[in-house]
């Protein structure tokens, strides 16, 4: 249930940025029409909605801090603003959960790398996500 919550967080963060949706709208949409819903004969996975809200809230509330940590982990030529929006959402969700300090860091990193694999099954993006989240995890000790 927590894995699915993380996946929905990444989708929600991406969608918030893509269409400039606010936090309350996105929570309502995901909780009422996505998480565990059935649309056009497709059943969406259920998820821990409380955990979804918690990570999403931390990601939005601390976005400038998260983006700063991410920028510090990236090469100077590639600030977070130049990163693919899906990867940005992965970083924001992953770092938000790292800031919660409840789940072991290696678990958080592995979970978000697995989500990256879902979006980029044949790309090198998963190694990139792993490296950046690992670097940031050491900074938030």
Image: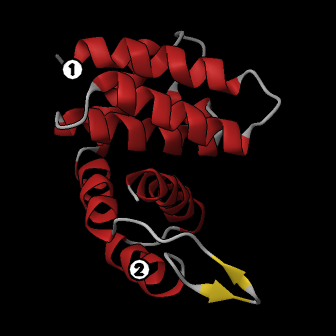
Residue at point 25%, 58% (across, down): 57
x then y, percent, for residue 3: 45, 50
Dividing the image into 4 quarters, which one contains the C terminus? Answer: top left
Q: Tell me which label, 1 or 2, sits earlier in the chain.
A: 2
> Disc number at residue 96?
none
Q: Is residue 81 above or below residue 50?
A: above
The answer for how far apart the CA atoms under marks 1 and 2 are is 30 Å
- Residue where numbered disc 1 is placed: 140
x then y, percent, for residue 63: 31, 44
Q: Nearer the viewer, mark 1 or mark 2?
A: 2
Q: Is residue 78 left or right of residue 9?
A: right
x then y, percent, for residue 90: 51, 40
> Disc number at residue 31?
2
Q: Tell me the element at label 2.
A: helix
Q: Is residue 119 left or right of residue 7?
A: right
Q: Is residue 7 left or right of residue 58?
A: right
Nearer-the-camera pick, 20 or 125? 125
């Amino acid at each position: 249930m927590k894995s699915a919550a993380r996946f929905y967080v990444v989708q929600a963060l991406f969608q918030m940025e893509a269409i400039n949706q606010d936090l309350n709208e996105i929570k309502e949409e995901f909780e009422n029409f996505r998480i565990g819903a059935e649309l056009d004969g497709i059943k969406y996975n259920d998820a821990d909605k409380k955990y979804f809200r918690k990570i999403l809230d931390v990601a939005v509330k601390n976005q400038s801090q998260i983006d700063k940590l991410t920028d510090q982990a990236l090469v100077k030529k590639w600030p977070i603003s130049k990163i693919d929006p899906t990867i940005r959402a992965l970083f924001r969700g992953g770092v938000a959960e790292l800031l919660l300090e409840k789940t072991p860091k290696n678990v958080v990193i592995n979970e978000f790398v697995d989500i990256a694999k879902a979006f980029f099954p044949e790309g090198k993006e998963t190694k990139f996500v792993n490296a950046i989240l690992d670097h940031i995890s050491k900074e938030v000790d």
